[in-house]
Amino acid sequence: MKLLKPSIPKELDADVAMSVIIPHAEAIAGKSLSYLYEFKGVSERTALGDNLNIGIRNKQNAMSVIKFSLKRDSIYHILPEYLFHPLDHYLGTDSDTEEFDKRYKEQEEQKNKALTYFGPFDQRFQHLRTDYQQWLNEHIFSGNQFLADFITDGYETNLGNPYIKAVYACIPWLRDFRGNDDMIRTALEYAFRGNAEIHKEQRGVEVPISENIPSRIDGLLGNLYCGSIFKDWVWVWKVFYQTKIDTARNLNILKQQIREFSDFFSRWFLPVESKFEIEFGDRLAIPELSETETVKGIFLNYSTQLI
C-alpha cells in the first residue's frame, strides 16, 4: 500500500512524532519498508526549532523508504572539529573567491564522509530514543494514564472496575470542564461504550429546614419557607445502561460495579449540587416461552393460565 506523507504539528517533539509514525507506517507497509536518517545538528535546531522533515519514496515492487531529517547532533557534530578539518582551512584565501569555494567544497566532502561513517551509530542511538518513546506512549501516556494517576494520587480508585477504567482517561479534563454538560455526556459515553440513554432533568426535592438555610426569595410564594421543610430544585443526571444479564452472579457483580462507579463519577465529575441515578437492564431481551437445549426460560403450555 502506498504511504502518504503525514502532517505533523510544528510544536510536536521529533521523537514523539517518530514514535507514532513508525508503528503506523509498519502496520501499513509491513516489512516492505526501510528508513534513512539525516542529522542536521543542533545549530540548525537552535535557529529553526525541532521541526521534523519527512520524505517518502514509494516504488513499485520495492521497499518504500522513509527519510527522517532531524535537527539533532551526529557523533560527527559532537567530536572536536579539528579531528576532521584543519582549523586554519581558510587561511590565506583573503578575497580569492575561487580558492574559498574550492576549500569549502573540500570541507563539505570531508563532512559528508564523516556523517556517512558515523551514520549507522547515529541511527542506532536514534532507534533507542524512538523505542523508549514508544514504550512511554504505551505504558505511561496511553489513555492519559500518567496525568490521571497524578491527579488521583492518594484516593482509592479501583481500576479493576471496567466502568471506572473506561472513564479514567477523562480525569485530566476536570480542571477546566468539571460540571460541563458536554463533558459529562462524553465521559458517560466512554463509560458505557455508547450503550446508555442519558438525560438531565430538574427535580424538586424536600429539604429539612436547618439553622443554616440560605434565603433565595425572588418574589414567588413557592420560595417562601413555611413549616419544617422547604422545596428545592436540583439537576439530576439519569442513565439507563442497556446490557445483557446472563446469570444471578453476573447480576450481583454488575450491581456492585455500577454502585461503585456511581460513587466515583458523582465525586469526580458532577457539580456538588447535582444528583446521579443509574439503572440498568436488558430491554431488548426476548422472553423464552419454552425450554431449549441451550437456554432455560419460562415454560408455558396449553394448560398455563396467565392472570
Image (spheres, helix red, strand yellow):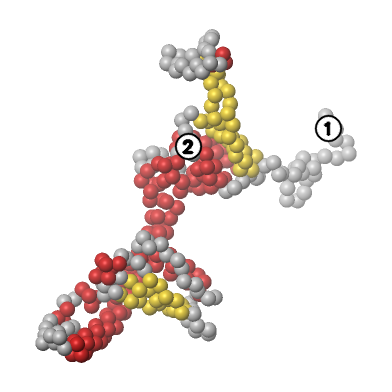
Identified by mark 1, the residue type is: Leu
Horizontal side of 98 relative to 222 (left or right) equals left
Q: Which residue is drawn at 58% across and 23% down?
A: 204
Horizontal side of 282 relative to 14 (left or right) equals right
Q: Which residue is drawn at 26% across and 66% down?
A: 46
Q: Residue 179 carries which label?
A: 2
Horizontal side of 47 relative to 33 (left or right) equals left
> What is the crowding at mark 1: few (fewer than 14 residues within 10 Å), some, or many (at least 20)?
few
Identified by mark 2, the residue type is: Gly
Q: 273 and 246: which one is in front?
A: 273
Residue depth check, mark 2 versus mark 1: number of the one nearer the observer: 2
Circle 2 — which element?
Answer: loop
- Residue 116 at what x, y percent from top left? 29, 83
Q: Quadrant of the C terminus?
A: top right
Residue 281 seen in the current view: yes
Q: 306 and 55: which one is in front?
A: 55
Label 1: which residue?
Answer: 306
Indicate whether 218 appears above or below 20: above
**Measured Cα–Cα span from mark 2 to mark 1:** 48 Å
- Residue 152 at what x, y percent from top left? 39, 42
Q: Residue at x 42, y 16 (%)?
A: 212
